[in-house]
Amino acid sequence: MLANRLCDQLSNSETTDKLSGPMAFKSTIAEFIKQDVNSKDTRKKVIEFWNTNKAQFICTYGNLKYLTPQPVLRRIIDMNIQEEVFFEFLLEDEFNDEYQVNVDINIVHINPKGEAETLLDYIQSIRDDKSLAALYDFDELADLQESLQEEYGGKYVKYAKKYPEYALEGY
């Protein structure tokens, strides 16, 4: 229920103001966990709640514009609001002591082809399909992909079985 409400809020921000995406994300989860959205530690509590329940954040009901079911983090990419949502809320400056909790981006999901993939694998699959160039900003996705890997510990499924340092939770 919460995941679908979150998907609705993100969809509403797509048609109004992209900067409302991070606030929609924060306020929707904060309201659900009964946390004051203006409290100093709201972001931390929202991210901790997300990380505890990360496998359940999937948009499950039909949407003609986007793949369904679809993990919320992938929906953010498909909506082209990744810069706003990831860097304005989900991921914070790792060198700032106030924000040491970031959303777990290494969730393994099964794609429609039946293959396991993380968010980085998903972004790479988009970039590998040149027919999608009109729908996505490939340069922006490349920057996000690099940042997620180098600064936030993002991993690829293809390395998980080959290298112990790429081990993924639940995979």
Image: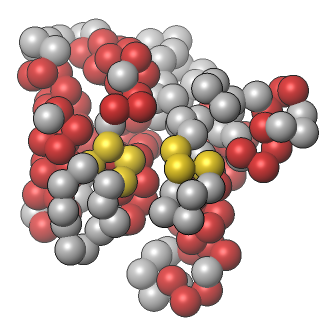
Q: Quadrant of the N terminus?
A: top left
Residue 17, can we see it? Answer: no
Residues 1 and 19: in front is 1
Is 125 located above or below residue 73 in the figure? below
Residue 130, can we see it? Answer: yes
Q: Image point 20% across, 74% down: which residue?
A: 64
Is 142 located above or below residue 156 in the figure? below
User: x%, y% of residue 100?
Assistant: 51, 15
Please tell me in which quadrant of the rendered image residue 141 appears.
bottom right
Is 53 located above or below residue 130 in the figure? above
Q: Is residue 19 left or right of residue 136?
A: left
Residues 95 and 59: in front is 59
Q: Is residue 72 left or right of residue 160?
A: left
Q: Is residue 36 left or right of residue 81?
A: left
Q: Quadrant of the C terminus?
A: top right
Pick out the residue farthest to the front: 114
> How many numbered marks have been drawn onto this rendered protein structure?
0
User: x%, y% of residue 106?
Assistant: 59, 35
User: x%, y% of residue 160?
Assistant: 78, 37
Q: Image point 83% across, 37% down: which residue?
A: 161
Is 3 located above or below residue 66 in the figure? above
What scheme was used to colour the molecule? secondary structure
User: x%, y% of residue 136?
Assistant: 46, 76
Q: Is residue 35 left or right of residue 111?
A: left
Q: Image point 11% across, 57% down: which residue?
A: 12
Q: Image point 24% across, 15% down: which residue?
A: 42
